């Protein structure tokens, strides 16, 4: 027996753990586990890692090391980095030591988490001192990324630093056995943030409970209220109130783009209210209750129980559950679904500041519910769609980003990727890691560009990594490319569609030979034309263009993205097809097309979808990007096939899909529009398969990837995947990285590293 009363031979180990171990209650978990297993020693944060000294008799330390991984808190993702012998320190218990930041950084920044079940129980308990407190949280939930000012993740390094803890909260915060031990945003009604209600006309209400009730009353009266949440403000109104929804659309203005809806939690799984309006399948239901609480696209139920103005001419609604205690209280008290759309100027990042809401959204928000917990950086809601049976991200955001991934290689020096111009994200990579930012938005405004540069600076500061070079899109006119040219770092240009293909290759590194269909709107190709319907063979760093869609000249260039009639007219003019539905004032555009004035050549699949939507009379002028293709998919009915599209060699030796047979088919008046819309998708899926088979015959490639914004289209993706698999291809779609331009930054990292 040892002189301290412990029997057996004493062993001591120094354990180092990495991964997601900060901001998730990992140190309190270590403390409790050590007490349970009779382990003496200590634990502390060391610049993103956790260092543990553990000593005990017998095999207890070995068991402790195993249980640290096997029983980790739900939100933690620990990895045992080192397990080294150590000298016994003759400890008499276990302690949590203060964080140290002097070690080499190996940092993981946690995203913002939904309100956990324990906190929600307290929120609803009249006996609890945090009953109905809108900012309740613990080590397992609450804001993280949006309030961290720097690391290590301790309260003084967050936007909660200005809120001094009351004695009760201080006791919880300092007690290793408490659920709120070092929960950095911890607060209560006595010491924490407060709500404030402000109407366009009338006095402000500073009492939190009264402010909440005033907000509910305004919503019931049909008002539009700007509500400050975790990563920014929402514009909220009654989702069943046609007049309120119409007023929101007119004022923002947002005439057609779908609006997200937040539903109250009801029923055993919390989804009863959701199921009253939409029909989530098993995969959608699992996503809705996932800890990141994203917006999930779900099929509408008939008859519609919500305003028809929520998602006009579409078959799905973006649904989500409350993810913060404030939202939980708001939805519980209101008792019905609420529109919860980002409070922003169209295309910009979500607004986070009260002044901006007042100055920039005064024509929209008829009242506002503010709070005084500062938001350090914006994080919009993440958006997912289930395609081919699996969740696919359409937008990274609150709860899912910053997205941290392992690289299938090791970089010699840190690399920054600045993405594209639309749906921008940025990525920072170093060693064998990459971090992709939340959604920033379209870089066409000054504010978007300021946030873009803020996120670039923030990522490097938070992760303590300084980029040594920058990679950007090959289009010199993109704001992100202009930033790369002036930032002072060595810059590398990557073709838009090579980045799309490499994003998929990065997600599935075991595949060594690819055929990737990169279909989207437009992106600059190496021949100076606008690509967008490409078949790329090879691997990251060595893509070869093996096929394309038949190119055409696009009148008006970029204007065609918002005016689908231009794509339709160009296809008809090129083939001599008469289009009775052409706009009466198309003559100047036709003359410009004839003379090739501002008519770049393109092979873009996205513009082909635009053309089909216009030819079917669905959308001639779009109020948001992708409106035509989205309505075309929603209009599709039946299971019939469309015309066969020839696939033949062009003058450059590429396998080219000829879209010409689609034009007379789409203009058949006596065939229901829904059948023609479905036939259009089926024809393209058949042609994609034909192109894949021909390229396989030449190159032997059997792994097919579907990347680019067009493959957000469930109908096309599933038709194509089914056909390809039936012909023996292995088919891949992105699962962590969006297929659209939000995935470009990650793809740029993969492509640039492979080329180097």
Image (cartoon, rainbow, N blue to C red):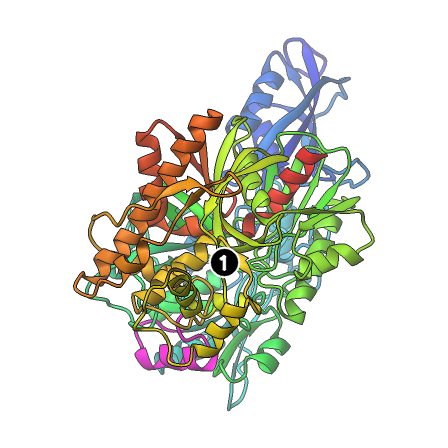
Is residue 244 part of the magenta span, yes or no?
yes
Q: Quadrant of the C terminus?
A: top right
Asked if 15 appears above or below 385 in the picture, the reply is above
Q: Which residue is mark 1?
A: 381
Asked if 537 appears above or below 195 in the picture, the reply is above
Q: Is residue 114 visible?
A: no
User: What residue is at 62 percent from the left and 76 percent from the top?
Assistant: 356
Percent from the top left, x then y, of residue 401? 57, 49
Asked if 53 appears above or below 194 in the picture, the reply is above
Percent from the top left, x then y, of residue 698? 46, 27
Q: Residues within 10 Å of mark 1 (few under 14, many from 20)?
A: many
Rendered image quadrant of residue 633 = bottom left
Is residue 125 part of the magenta span, yes or no?
no
Count all numbered tags in the image, as a single digit: 1
Secondary-structure class at tag 1: loop
The magenta segment: 237-256
User: What residue is at 53 percent from the left and 65 percent from the top?
Assistant: 229
Percent from the top left, x then y, of residue 250? 42, 81
Percent from the top left, x then y, of residue 257? 41, 68
- Looking at this view, name the residue that lies furthest to the left: 670
Q: Quadrant of the N terminus?
A: top right
Rendered image quadrant of residue 656 = top left
Q: Is residue 402 left or right of residue 305?
A: right
Q: Is residue 10 visible?
A: yes
Q: Is residue 31 left or right of residue 681?
A: right
* Nearer the observer, 507 or 179: 507
* Nearer the observer, 447 or 313: 313
Asked if 193 appears above or below 720 in the picture, the reply is below
* Nearer the observer, 21 or 4: 21
Q: Is residue 446 left or right of residue 278?
A: right
């Amino acid at each position: 027996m040892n002189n301290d009363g412990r029997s057996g031979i004493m062993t001591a180990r120094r354990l180092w753990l990495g991964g997601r171990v900060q901001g998730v209650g990992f140190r309190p978990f270590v403390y409790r586990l050590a007490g349970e297993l009779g382990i003496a020693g200590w634990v502390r944060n060391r610049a993103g890692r956790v260092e543990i000294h553990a000593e005990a008799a017998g095999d207890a330390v070995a068991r402790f090391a195993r249980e640290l991984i096997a029983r980790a808190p739900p939100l933690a993702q620990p990895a045992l980095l080192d397990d080294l012998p150590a000298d016994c320190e003759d400890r008499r218990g276990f302690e949590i030591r203060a964080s140290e930041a002097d070690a080499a950084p190996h940092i993981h920044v946690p995203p913002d988490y939904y309100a956990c079940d324990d906190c929600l129980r307290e929120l609803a308990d009249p006996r609890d001192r945090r009953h109905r407190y809108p900012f309740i949280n613990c080590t397992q939930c609450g804001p993280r990324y949006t309030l961290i000012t720097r690391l290590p993740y301790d309260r003084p390094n967050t936007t909660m630093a200005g809120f001094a803890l009351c004695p009760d909260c201080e006791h919880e915060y300092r007690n290793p056995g408490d659920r709120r031990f070092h929960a950095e945003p911890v607060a209560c009604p006595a010491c924490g943030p407060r709500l404030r209600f402000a109407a366009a006309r009338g006095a402000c209400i500073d009492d939190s409970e009264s402010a909440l009730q005033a907000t509910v009353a305004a919503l019931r009266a049909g008002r539009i209220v700007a509500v400050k949440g975790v990563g920014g403000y929402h514009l909220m109104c009654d989702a069943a109130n046609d007049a309120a929804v119409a007023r929101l659309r007119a004022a923002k203005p947002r005439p057609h783009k779908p609006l997200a809806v937040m539903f109250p939690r009801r029923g055993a799984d919390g989804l009863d209210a959701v199921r009253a309006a939409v029909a989530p399948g098993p995969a959608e239901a699992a996503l809705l209750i996932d800890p990141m609480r994203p917006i999930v696209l779900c099929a509408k139920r008939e008859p519609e129980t919500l305003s028809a103005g929520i998602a006009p001419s579409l078959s799905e609604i973006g649904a989500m559950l409350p993810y913060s205690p404030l939202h939980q209280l708001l939805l519980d008290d209101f008792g019905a679904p609420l529109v919860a759309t980002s409070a922003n100027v169209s295309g910009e990042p979500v607004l986070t500041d009260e002044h901006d809401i007042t100055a920039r959204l005064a024509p929209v928000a008829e009242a506002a519910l503010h709070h005084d917990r500062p938001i350090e950086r914006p994080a919009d809601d993440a958006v997912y769609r289930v395609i081919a049976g699996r969740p696919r991200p359409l937008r990274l955001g609150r709860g899912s980003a910053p997205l941290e991934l392992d690289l299938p290689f090791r970089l010699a020096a840190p690399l920054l990727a600045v993405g594209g111009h639309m749906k921008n994200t940025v990525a920072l990579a170093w060693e064998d890691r990459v971090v992709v930012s939340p959604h920033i938005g379209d870089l066409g405004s000054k504010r978007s560009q300021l946030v873009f540069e803020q996120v670039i600076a923030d990522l490097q500061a938070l992760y303590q990594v300084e980029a040594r070079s920058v990679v950007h899109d090959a289009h010199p006119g993109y704001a992100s490319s202009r930033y790369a040219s002036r930032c002072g770092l060595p810059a590398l240009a990557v073709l838009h569609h090579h980045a799309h293909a490499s994003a998929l290759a990065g997600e599935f590194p075991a595949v060594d030979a690819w055929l990737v269909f990169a279909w989207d709107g437009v992106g600059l190709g190496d021949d100076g034309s606008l690509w967008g319907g490409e078949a790329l063979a090879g691997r990251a760093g060595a893509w070869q263009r093996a096929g394309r869609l038949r190119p055409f000249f696009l009148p008006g260039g970029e204007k065609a993205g918002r005016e689908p009639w231009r794509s339709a007219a160009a296809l008809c003019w090129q083939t001599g097809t008469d289009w009775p539905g052409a706009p009466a004032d198309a003559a100047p555009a036709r003359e410009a097309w004839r003379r090739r004035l501002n008519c770049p050549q393109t092979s873009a699949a996205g513009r082909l979808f635009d053309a089909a939507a216009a030819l079917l009379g669905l959308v001639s002028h779009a109020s948001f990007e992708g409106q035509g293709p989205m309505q075309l998919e929603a209009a599709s009915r039946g299971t019939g096939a469309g015309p066969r599209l020839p696939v033949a060699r062009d003058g450059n030796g590429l396998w080219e899909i000829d879209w010409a047979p689609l034009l007379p088919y789409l203009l058949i008046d006596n065939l229901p529009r829904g059948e023609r819309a479905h036939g259009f998708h089926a024809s393209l899926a058949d042609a994609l398969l034909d192109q894949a088979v021909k390229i396989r015959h030449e190159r032997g490639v059997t792994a097919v990837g579907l990347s680019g914004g067009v493959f957000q289209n469930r109908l096309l993706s599933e038709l194509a995947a089914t056909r390809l698999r039936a012909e023996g291809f292995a088919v891949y779609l992105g699962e962590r990285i969006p297929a659209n331009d939000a995935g470009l930054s990650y793809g740029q990292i993969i492509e640039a590293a492979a080329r180097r």
